[in-house]
């Protein structure tokens, strides 16, 4: 089943690249790739390094708010390993899971580590949702396009849901009621059939539901405690806000400089208007290996709204992909030398209690 999913996603990657190439004239991509300004390529790699460092520093601050002091270089190493799993492996183990697992081993608390990764990631997603609504105002005419208006509307809806969840006293109460209602319905169906096997299945379902919500409530308590720690430390919270805003400014610079590497100037205002929407759309899990093909297709589609050719947008997207693979390759090297359990692969570690 897992192999079938990978094959389907690989097929989608190929399909997206074929669709992109279908919009180009013959030889157009090669002409764009042949006109490379290596000064901007080097600058784009430098920006990518600063982006990773900023995210890692933000993660370190969240862990510190919970009382865990891990060195920046230690967390940076784990961050690179996470990139390896995200960008280079057709695996169902994501980079955030890897980061949480290894950090949890070091701080001796998987729940604290998971909460820290969640806060670091979720705070970034909240700002991204806000930017997807606000940034297109830099080029207001873009709101006339459904490609921009629909994601922005979806971002507004998601932000509204987050605000509602924030003020709810017990956000798990509704889903827990729904699950228990489904279990009671299935229990009546199983009892009607009778037999030892159906009773065993019924007990197993109740046990799974109990374990699931017990784990979720433990995580919710840890997350709430972490948020309280952040509120009590306004200095750390302020730095988290600054680092998140800084990170997204760097994402604009990353795309802008990557376009300039191929002699294309899309205008910084246009890049700032579209990049948050592109990032939001590229989060949809359509293909594998870091959404290979789909992400490039998103860039080609959206920057066409600014009059940028498909070849130029694809070249820019491929440069971003090369940087991602470079970081993933470094993460692979670090992963091969990182063994907390006598050389056991990460997949085996994660299966252990």
Image: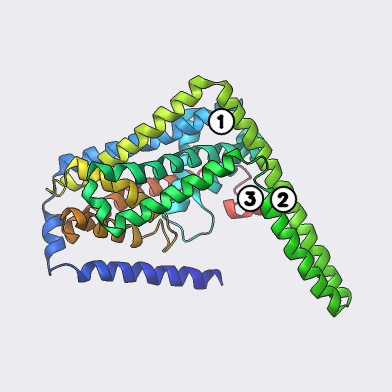
Question: Residue 213 — which label?
Answer: 2
Which quadrant, please, contains the N terminus? bottom right
Q: Mark 1 near mark 3, Cβ–Cβ under 8 Å? A: no
Tell me the distance, in whole angstroms, between the alpha carbons under discs 2 and 3.
Answer: 23 Å
Q: Secondary structure at mark 1?
A: helix
Q: Mark 2 near mark 1, Cβ–Cβ under 8 Å? A: no
Q: Secondary structure at mark 2?
A: helix
* For residue 215, side relative to residue 102 (left or right): right
Percent position of residue 242, x then y: 40, 28
Residue at horizontal 20 percent and vertical 40 percent from the top: 268
Percent position of residue 317, x then y: 27, 54
Residue of label 1 = 63
Percent position of residue 189, x then y: 80, 74
Residue at horizontal 42 percent and vertical 48 percent from the top: 156
Which tag, 2 or 1, sits closer to the chain's start?
1
Q: Residues within 10 Å of mark 1 (few under 14, many from 20)?
A: many
User: Which of label 2 and label 3 is nearer to you?
Assistant: 2
Q: Residues within 10 Å of mark 2 (few under 14, many from 20)?
A: some
**Residue 269, quarter of picture:** top left
Task: Please determine whether, in this image, residue 170 is positioned above or below residue 92.
Answer: above
Q: Residues within 10 Å of mark 3 (few under 14, many from 20)?
A: some
Residue at horizontal 45 percent and vertical 35 percent from the top: 76
Q: Secondary structure at mark 3?
A: helix
How many marks overall? 3
Question: Residue 349 — which label?
Answer: 3
Tell me the distance, in whole angstroms, between the alpha carbons under discs 2 and 1.
Answer: 24 Å
Which tag, 2 or 3, sits closer to the chain's start?
2
User: Which of label 1 and label 3 is nearer to you?
Assistant: 1
């Amino acid at each position: 089943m897992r192999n079938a999913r990978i094959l389907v996603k690989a097929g989608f990657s190929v399909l997206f690249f074929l669709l992109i190439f279908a919009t180009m004239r013959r030889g157009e991509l090669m002409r764009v790739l042949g006109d490379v300004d290596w000064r901007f390529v080097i600058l784009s790699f430098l920006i990518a390094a600063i982006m990773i460092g900023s995210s890692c520093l933000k993660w370190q601050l969240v862990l510190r708010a919970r009382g865990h002091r891990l060195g920046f270089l230690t967390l940076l190493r784990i961050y690179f390993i996470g990139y390896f799993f995200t960008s280079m492996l057709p695996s169902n183990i994501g980079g955030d899971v890897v980061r949480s697992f290894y950090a949890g081993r070091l701080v001796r608390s998987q729940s604290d580590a998971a909460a820290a990764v969640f806060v670091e990631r979720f705070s970034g997603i909240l700002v991204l949702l806000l930017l997807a609504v606000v940034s297109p105002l830099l080029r207001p005419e873009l709101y006339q396009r459904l490609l921009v208006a629909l994601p922005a509307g979806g971002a507004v809806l998601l932000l509204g849901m987050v605000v509602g969840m924030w003020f709810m006293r017990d956000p798990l109460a509704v889903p827990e009621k729904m699950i228990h209602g489904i279990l009671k319905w299935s229990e009546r169906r199983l009892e009607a059939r009778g037999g030892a096997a159906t009773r065993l299945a019924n007990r197993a379902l109740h046990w799974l539901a109990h374990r699931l919500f017990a784990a979720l409530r433990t995580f919710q308590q840890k997350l709430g405690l972490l948020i309280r720690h952040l509120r009590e430390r306004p200095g750390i919270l302020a730095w988290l806000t600054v680092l998140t805003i800084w990170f997204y400014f760097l994402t604009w610079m990353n795309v802008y400089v990557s376009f300039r590497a191929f002699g294309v100037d899309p205008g910084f205002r246009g890049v700032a208007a579209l990049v948050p929407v592109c990032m939001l759309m590229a989060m949809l899990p359509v293909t594998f290996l870091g959404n290979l093909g789909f992400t490039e297709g998103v860039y080609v589609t959206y920057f066409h709204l600014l009059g940028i050719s498909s070849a130029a947008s694809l070249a820019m997207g491929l440069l971003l992909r090369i940087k991602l693979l470079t970081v993933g390759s470094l993460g692979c090297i670090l992963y091969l030398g990182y063994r907390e359990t006598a050389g056991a692969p990460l997949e085996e570690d994660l299966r252990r209690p």
